[in-house]
Image (cartoon, grey):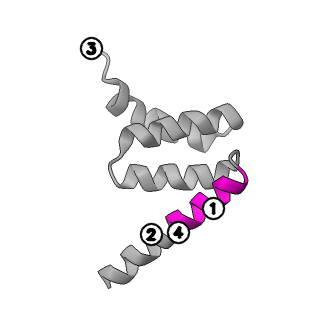
Amino acid sequence: GFLLAATEALLAVADLGRVLAREPRHYKAMTTWAMVLQKQEQKKPAYALYQRILQVYPLNETVKELADHLRADVKGRDL
């Protein structure tokens, strides 16, 4: 049920933290963490993490698309 899903999500985030503590440039772990943040409506931290990933791996098209999707929400919309 809900409690099991919440517990699994917390364990997954803890695992991501351990991976990033050992290898701070692990872009797959960073991407997963950013996606979790985005799903939790934490758009600014997710966007910042996507930008950090693009510094490590600038050719990652998936992350570029995810960041572009959030840009308007985080930076504001052009008039």
The kind of residue on which mark 1 rests is Arg
Choose the circle earlier in sequence order: 2 or 1.
2
Q: Earlier in the sequence, mark 1 or mark 4?
A: 4
Which residue lies under the disc numbered 3? 79
The kind of secondary structure element at disc 4 is helix
**Residue range highlighted in magenta:** 13-23
**Numbered mark located on residue 10 in the image:** 2
CB within 8 Å, label 2 to label 4:
yes
Screen quadrant of the N terminus: bottom left
**Cα–Cα span, label 2 and label 4:** 5 Å
Taking the spot 59% from the left edge, 35% from the top edge, the residue there is: 52
From the image, tell me which residue sits under label 4: 12
Question: Which of the two marks, 3 or 2, is nearer to us in this view?
Answer: 2
Question: Where does label 1 land, which residue?
Answer: 18
Q: Secondary structure at mark 1?
A: helix
The residue depicted at 66 percent of the width and 31 percent of the height is: 55
List x then y, in percent, for residue 70: 40, 36
At label 2, which amino acid type do we have? Answer: Leu
**Residue 8 pos. (x, y %):** 46, 76
Is 73 placed above or below 46 here? above
Label 4 and label 3: CA atoms lie apart by 40 Å
